[in-house]
Structures are given as C-alpha cells and as structure tokens.
Image (cartoon, helix red, strand yellow):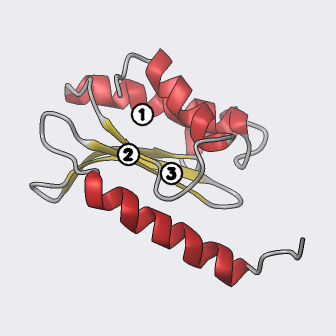
Amino acid sequence: MAQMSAKLKAKRRLRRKRHIRRNVSGTQARPRMSVFRSVAHIYVQLVDDEAGHTLCSASTLEKDLRGAVPSTGNCGAAKAVGEKIAARAGVAGVKKVVFDRNGFKYHGRVKALADAAREGGMEF
C-alpha cells in the first residue's frame, strides 16, 4: 500500500469534519466540545454555536500544563488537557456537551482527552 501524501490526508480530514459539523451544533445549555490536535499540541474548547462564543478552552500551550507534562504531543498531555477542560467547564456551569472530534479518529490522544473529561464529570 502506497503512503498517503500529507495534502491528501488533510483533505480527507476536512471532508470528514464537514460531515460531522453538518449534524453537530452547540447551544448554551449543551455546547460543542471541539478538539484539535497537531503533531506537537492538543487544543479543546467549548463553543456555543448559537451565540458564536467560546465558553472556555484548554491546550498544551498553557504554561502550567507545559511544566506538568514531559511531552505535549502524547496521550498523557491529552489526558491533562481533558482534566483541565472538565474543571473549567464545571466553573462555567457546563456539565453536558456535544463532542466534536473535528474529523480526527476517536483514537489515541482524542480518546484520552475525551475519557479524562468524562472522568472529570462531563457528559457526552
């Protein structure tokens, strides 16, 4: 099997993302939990699509997380970000969310983040 080019891989992910976003939308009562991962970092935010506002966010770029984890591009870092977003969502009064994996497979870092957020008290 030939290796897929980076351009084709990105194009396929964006196509999956469009299909997901067609059905997934966040509200004030149940915001969309959007996850983005790059090679080096992972980002998550809670978005109210009706108002067009981000309620809270977390990423491996934050100073306290960068110091706490040895590497920012692995499952351990994703788990730390999931715990942080669950804590911030609790402060914002959000318990239920709609999960948006942004075209990425529900596997590895995306799954680790989701599982940590669930353990932190979020429902989706």
Question: Is 39 or 96 nearer to us in this picture?
Answer: 96
Q: Is residue 11 left or right of residue 54?
A: right
* Alpha-carbon span between mark 1 and mark 2: 6 Å
What is the quadrant of residue 113 in the picture? Answer: top right
How many numbered marks have been drawn onto this rendered protein structure?
A: 3
Residue ID for mark 2:
57
Q: Amino acid at mark 1?
A: Ile
What is the quadrant of residue 87 in the picture? Answer: top left
Residue ID for mark 3:
43
Q: Quarter of the image containing the C terminus?
A: top left
Q: Is residue 108 left or right of residue 97?
A: right
Labelled pair 3, 2 in contact (Cβ < 8 Å) = yes
- The spot of residue 20 in percent (x, y) is 38, 57
The dot on residue 85 is 1
| SS class, disc 3 | strand
Q: Amino acid at mark 3?
A: Tyr
Residue furthest right in the image: 1
Q: Quarter of the image containing the N terminus?
A: bottom right
| SS class, disc 2 | strand
* Alpha-carbon span between mark 1 and mark 3: 10 Å
Question: Is 51 or 4 nearer to us in this picture?
Answer: 4
**Residue at the location (27% across, 53% down)?**
23
- The spot of residue 93 in percent (x, y) is 20, 25
* Alpha-carbon span between mark 3 and mark 2: 8 Å
Labelled pair 1, 2 in contact (Cβ < 8 Å) = yes
Q: Amino acid at mark 2?
A: Ser
- The spot of residue 91 in percent (x, y) is 26, 25
Q: Earlier in the sequence, mark 1 or mark 3?
A: 3
**Residue at the location (35% across, 30% down)?**
88
- The spot of residue 30 in percent (x, y) is 20, 35
| SS class, disc 1 | helix
